[in-house]
Image (tube, rainbow, N blue to C red):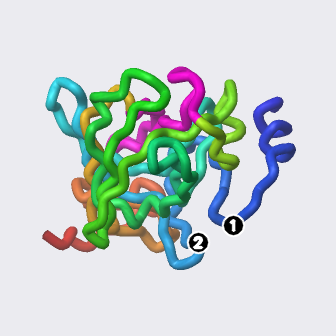
Amino acid sequence: MRTIQRLFATPIVLNAFFTIAVCAQLKVKEDHGHIAPVRAKITLRNDRTREVVINGVGGGDNALSHVMIVWTEAGVSKRTIWIDSIASISGLDNIRRATDEFTVHLKNASEVSAMFSGGGIYGAQCSEGQRPDNVDNLCSILFIGNADEGTEKLNMRDLKSVEFLPAGRKDKLGNAMFDTWKFSPFTGERLPSPAN
């Protein structure tokens, strides 16, 4: 309950900064023409891969649903990146300090060298994009859903890379669907075959 109270005390500047809780039903939402959640293939440090649905990026129990706030230009500039405009994120396995950089590859073929923003002890200030000061205090947590309907939080510092996939299918209620699902677990409807 305290998390919810803290949530309402956090200033929300743009509609893009929806603070979310991890939940089993991942509804596809649009904000300023951008969608969330997004599908992605994550590569773990042991080179194993998993397909997931990213519902947000943040820290602690708080996440931003449509955007990721990073520091660029060696920590000089703060930048907000729409999650659905990212093609991939690489170099995550090289992060040791709060100010270590990784590369964000955007869908428009540009690249951004970035570092995670700081977010306070519980990630409550991820929407403010504080300067990174402590490696344990970064907004580097992926809030994800799995094909088995489970949810979890993964620290991007424990990954090698994240590859963002084309927009996923939705059921008639707008829930995000995995390609392996033939029926919606929420509505029971038969889903069209995924496009290859």
**Residue range of the region highlighted in magenta in the rendering:** 132-156
**Image point 36% across, 60% down: which residue?**
86
Q: Position of residue 128 (x, y in %)?
A: 69, 47
Cα distance between the residues tagged 2 and 1: 7 Å
Mark 2 residue element: strand
Q: Report if the CB atoms under discs 2 and 1 are less than 8 Å apart.
A: yes
Quadrant containing the C terminus in the rendered view: bottom left
Residue type beneath disc 1: Asn
Q: Residues within 10 Å of mark 1 (few under 14, many from 20)?
A: few
Q: Position of residue 57 (x, y in %)?
A: 51, 45
Of residue 93 and residue 22, the one placed in the foreground of this image is 93
Q: Position of residue 34 (x, y in %)?
A: 50, 72
| Residue 88 sits above or below residue 47 on the image | below
Question: Any mark on residue 31, and which?
Answer: 2
**Image point 16% across, 32% down: which residue?**
48
Question: Any mark on residue 103, and which?
Answer: none
Q: Where does label 1 land, which residue?
A: 15
**Image point 29% across, 28% down: which residue?**
94
Of the numbered discs 2 and 1, the one sitting upstream in the chain is: 1
Q: Position of residue 17 (x, y in %)?
A: 66, 57
